[in-house]
């Protein structure tokens, strides 16, 4: 994402620092439960929890040689753990860590999106009531039709975004899953109780069955919902842009005192926010199609 359009709190979630922090927590929880079950020494689990740390630059350097991100991570963390490192990543496979971490990152991100969506819905509800008697012309095919109210127009968006909130909640539940099932998902090298334990600690659902990777239909559904939400945002943004045309000018975006619309035409008050939202929405939908294809390829691979 172009930095000026990014949200710092979401960018932080997808940083390497946060990803490896989640990986480390998953690994520590696995060792913790294995110690409870008598699979590894309790002392080793305590050592792993106490000493497990990583260095992003060192991991990147190691990965250039190993050509494997998880192996590079394990080598780096093991250096800090010491003797007990032989019980680190014990019985699990790379996808157990990668996919469970990805689930948590998606959940963290979607919770931020949900919070903003709730605020948007509240605002639309307030504005719908405020302008319920504000007359304006209704249009069909862009041509004057019959009178409506601005409140009615906003109510349409209010209920649409309420439906999006329901979809987001379903999508969050869909991707909030943990899979710690070992190579090819058979649990041959890892006790199923460990998956349940890690899932509970991370506030995720325990995956029913996996092929060592979490089924990609979950992710396809999640990103499809984001695509629908983006379409709703675009519909709203386009409406604002149309109503702000000079020859219409029934609605206008806020425009701060020092804001400029043009370097050559000082009279311009462009709907820059709506334009940005429209562009980003289209970008999300195009990326959504690509992600679904990747999910399909991932399922074929495994």
Image (cartoon, helix red, strand yellow):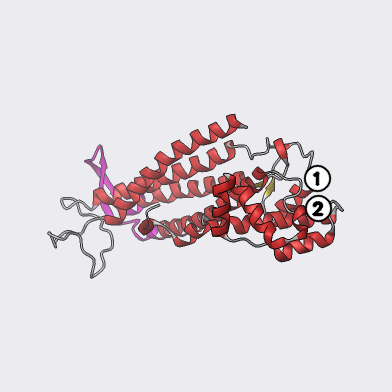
Answer few, some or many: residues within 10 Å of disc 1's Cα (few below 14, many 20 plus, some between 14 and 19).
some
Residue 249 vertical placement versus 223 (above, below): below
Work out whether 3 lies above or below 256.
above
x then y, percent, for residue 91: 76, 45
Residue 109 in the image: x percent, y percent?
53, 54
Residue on which the image places disc 2: 34
Q: Is residue 279 left or right of residue 99?
A: left
Q: Secondary structure at mark 1?
A: loop
What SS does tag 2 mark?
helix
Where residue 285 sits in the image (x, y, percent)?
A: 41, 41
Marked residue nearer the N-terminal end (1 or 2): 2
Residue 103 in sight from this viewpoint = no
**Magenta residues?**
127-153
Q: Is residue 69 left or right of residue 268?
A: right
**Residue 191 disc label:** 1
Name the one closer to the observer, 74 or 61: 61
Q: Residue at x 57, y 34 (%)?
A: 298
Nearest the eye: 213 or 131: 213
- 124 above or below 92? below
Q: How many C-alpha atoms fall within 10 Å of the one at disc 2: few (<14), some, or many (≥20)?
A: many
């Amino acid at each position: 994402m172009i930095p000026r359009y990014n949200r710092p709190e979401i960018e932080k979630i997808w940083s390497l620092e946060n990803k490896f922090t989640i990986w480390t927590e998953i690994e520590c929880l696995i060792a913790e439960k294995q110690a409870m079950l008598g699979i590894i020494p309790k002392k080793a689990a305590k050592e792993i929890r106490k000493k497990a740390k990583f260095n992003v630059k060192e991991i990147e350097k190691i990965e250039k040689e190993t050509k494997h991100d998880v192996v590079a991570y394990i080598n780096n963390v093991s250096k800090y753990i010491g003797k007990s490192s032989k019980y680190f990543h014990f019985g699990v496979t790379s996808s157990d860590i990668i996919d469970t971490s990805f689930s948590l990152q998606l959940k963290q991100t979607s919770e931020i999106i949900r919070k903003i969506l709730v605020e948007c819905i509240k605002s639309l509800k307030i504005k719908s009531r405020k302008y319920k008697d504000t007359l304006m012309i209704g249009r069909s095919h862009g041509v004057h039709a019959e009178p409506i109210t601005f409140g009615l127009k906003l109510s349409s968006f209010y209920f649409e975004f309420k439906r999006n909130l329901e979809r987001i909640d379903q999508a969050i539940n869909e991707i909030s899953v943990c899979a710690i099932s070992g190579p090819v998902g058979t649990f041959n090298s890892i006790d199923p109780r460990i998956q349940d334990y890690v899932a509970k600690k991370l506030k995720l659902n325990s995956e029913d069955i996996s092929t060592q990777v979490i089924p990609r239909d979950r992710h396809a559904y999640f990103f499809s919902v984001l695509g629908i939400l983006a379409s709703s945002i675009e519909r709203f943004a386009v409406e604002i842009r149309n109503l702000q045309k000079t020859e219409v000018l029934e609605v206008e975006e806020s425009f701060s005192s020092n804001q400029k619309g043009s370097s050559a035409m000082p009279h311009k008050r462009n709907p820059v926010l709506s334009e940005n939202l429209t562009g980003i929405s289209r970008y999300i939908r195009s990326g959504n199609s690509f992600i679904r294809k990747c999910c399909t390829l991932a399922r074929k691979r495994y």
